[in-house]
Image (spheres, rainbow, N blue to C red):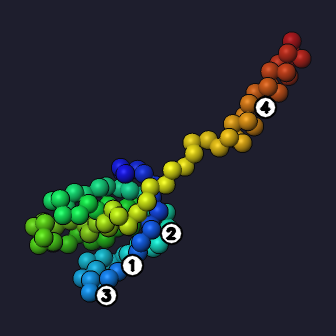
Amino acid sequence: MKPGDKVICINDKIDADKSGEIRRDFEIWITKDKEYTIREILDNNGIVTGVLLDEVHNFPKFFKLINRYQEPAFAIWRFRKLNYAATPAEALSEVEELVEVDKEQLVKVK
């Protein structure tokens, strides 16, 4: 995954023992089955890779574990990259048909 990629949330569950911590750190939480766009990927000192999303902005907090202020990031394992086909096959065949029609009309005009 990289910034700009479309992803879908596959896990928005919060462990009961982490609920208080998560509620303190995140004003806005993610929703399962919702699509998001990766804004930035954070290494978090190798502890857990996190992602920031275009659609979700939380206030930066100080995290003792990584010893810095940053926007809380969502664990990358909570998401799956979406792979959209660049152009569906049906659309390609329609474009080809239109091009053929235009060529025929061009020939008739001459």
Q: Which residue appears at 28% of the width and 80% of the height?
A: 22
> Residue 72 appears in which quarter of the rendering?
bottom left
Side (left or right) of 55 relative to 26 = right
Q: Quadrant of the C terminus?
A: top right
Residue 97 tag number: 4
Residue 58 makes an appearance in the image? yes
Query: Disc 4 and disc 2: Cα gap in Å?
Result: 37 Å
Residue indicated by mark 1: 13
Q: Is residue 38 left or right of residue 43?
A: right
Q: Residues within 10 Å of mark 2 (few under 14, many from 20)?
A: some
As displayed, is residue 70 above or below residue 5? Answer: below
* Inter-mark Cα distance, 2 to 1: 12 Å
In front of the other: 44 or 25: 44
In this figure, which residue is indicated by the disc labeled 3? 16
Mark whose residue sits in front, 4 or 3: 3
Q: Depth check: 50 or 11 in front?
A: 11
Going from N to C along the chain, the mark reached first, 1 or 4, is 1
Residue identifier under label 2: 33
